Image (cartoon, helix red, strand yellow):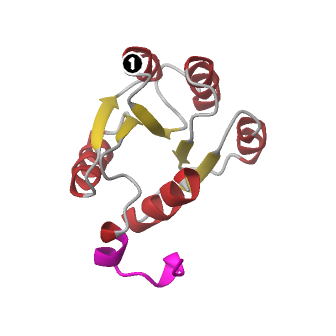
Amino acid sequence: MPDQTNLTTAEMISTAPLAGKTVLLVEDETFIADLLISWFAQLGAKTLCANSGKEGVRLLTAHTAEVCVVVADFKLPDMDGGDMCTQLRVLKPGIPILLSSGRYQREAKESLSRGGPTCFLQKPYPLEEVLVKLKMLLD
């Protein structure tokens, strides 16, 4: 497998791990959500989008079989990311989760990784880094 850090954007898209898959995106910042939805569509993924933790849990409840990965903001207006992840993993044990935050959450990373594959991204982040982390989670 080629080194992901040396791939161009076109090469990363051609090897996208999301083609034909469904992503649950939980993001309260509209600009970031719109950008990720558009980008995931270019990678061949269907995106279910929630702007709160409760809505994310509701969407996973309704689409448990379809969703293969969750991309979520760690700090949501209605729910802590750790609590949301725990609820999501009750619904679908071991589901891979990519969390992002403006601040690094070492303690959360350590506890959440025990429940299934979890990666963190520090905001702001380049879109290519999202793909690198998703490949790690889904491979």
Judge whether 76 appears above or below 99 on screen. above
Which amino acid lies under the numbered mark 1 shown in the image of this protein? Glu
Q: Is residue 14 left or right of residue 41?
A: right
Residue at image mark 1: 55
Mark 1 surroundings: few (<14), some (14-19) or many (≥20) residues within 10 A? some
Quadrant location of residue 131? Answer: bottom left
Quick one: 64 or 82, which is closer to the camera?
Answer: 64
Q: Which part of the image, by quadrant, shows the C terminus?
A: bottom right
Judge whether 73 appears above or below 12 on screen. above
Residue in the image at 37% along x and 52% along y = 18
Residue in the image at 35% along x and 43% along y = 21
The location of residue 67, given as percent across then percent down, is 41, 32
Q: Is residue 7 magenta?
A: yes
Judge whether 57 appears above or below 44 on screen. above
The location of residue 109, given as percent across then percent down, is 71, 44
Quick one: 73 or 44, which is closer to the camera?
Answer: 44
The magenta segment is 1-12
Q: Secondary structure at mark 1?
A: helix
The location of residue 129, given as percent across then percent down, is 47, 65
The location of residue 15, given as percent across then percent down, is 37, 68
Q: Which part of the image, by quadrant, shows the N terminus?
A: bottom right
Q: Is residue 20 left or right of residue 137?
A: left
Residue in the image at 31% along x and 31% along y = 49
Judge whether 138 appears above or below 66 on screen. below
Quadrant location of residue 86? Answer: top right
* Label total for image: 1
Q: Is residue 34 magenta?
A: no
